[in-house]
Image: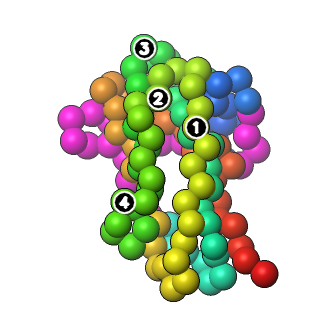
Amino acid sequence: NVSWGGKPISIAGKAYATGFGTPAAVRGGGSLVFCKVPEGATHFAAMVGVDDSSPIRDASVRFAVHVDDVRQAETRPLAFGEAQLLVVPLAPGAKQVKLFTTGERPVHASWGGAGFVLGK
C-alpha cells in the first residue's frame, strides 16, 4: 500500500489508501506483477498513473492487464498528472491476472486502489 518510493500512493493529486507501486522500467523490461484470481471475482479494478512522488516527471507509463495470458486492457502512455481507471471483467474460472508497467524512463508507476471485485 505504498508507492515504489515507499510513500503513500498518490496519482494526479488523489491519495489512495490501498494499492501498490512499481518501477516502470525501460526497453522491453518493465514491471510484472502476478495476481491469483480469488474465487468469485468478477472484475479487477485500479486507478493507474505516474505516482505524484516520482522524481522523474517528464516521462510516460503504459499499463496493461492480462487475464490468463490474454491482454484485456492497456492504457495509452500516461504522463505525470494523468490517471486512468482500469476495470477488467473476469470470465468465470479465470486463474491469473498479470499487471504490466512499461515506460521510457524508470518512473514510479502506481496502481491505486487495486483489487478484485467479488460477485454475490
The residue labelled by disc 3 is 58
Question: Nearer the N terminus, badge 4 or badge 2?
Answer: 4
- Mark 4 to mark 2: distance in Å? 18 Å
The residue labelled by disc 1 is 84
Q: Where is residue 32 in the image (x, y as percent from the top left)?
A: 38, 53
**Principal secondary structure, stretch drawn in magenta:** strand
Against 55, residue 20 (above or below) is below
Q: Is mark 3 on a helix, strand or loop?
A: loop
Q: Where is residue 3 in the image (x, y as percent from the top left)?
A: 59, 37
- Mark 1 to mark 4: distance in Å? 17 Å
The residue labelled by disc 4 is 71
Asked which colour scheme the image uses, the reply is: rainbow
Question: Nearer the N terminus, badge 1 or badge 4?
Answer: 4
Against 69, residue 83 (above or below) is above
Q: Where is residue 74 in the image (x, y as percent from the top left)?
A: 42, 47
Question: How dense is the environment of label 2, judged by Cα within 10 Å: few (below 14), some, or many (20 and up)?
Answer: some
Name the amino acid, label 3.
Asp
- Mark 3 to mark 2: distance in Å? 11 Å
Name the mark nearer the viewer: 3 or 1. 1
Q: Where is residue 29 in the image (x, y as percent from the top left)?
A: 26, 43
Question: Nearer the N terminus, badge 2 or badge 1?
Answer: 2
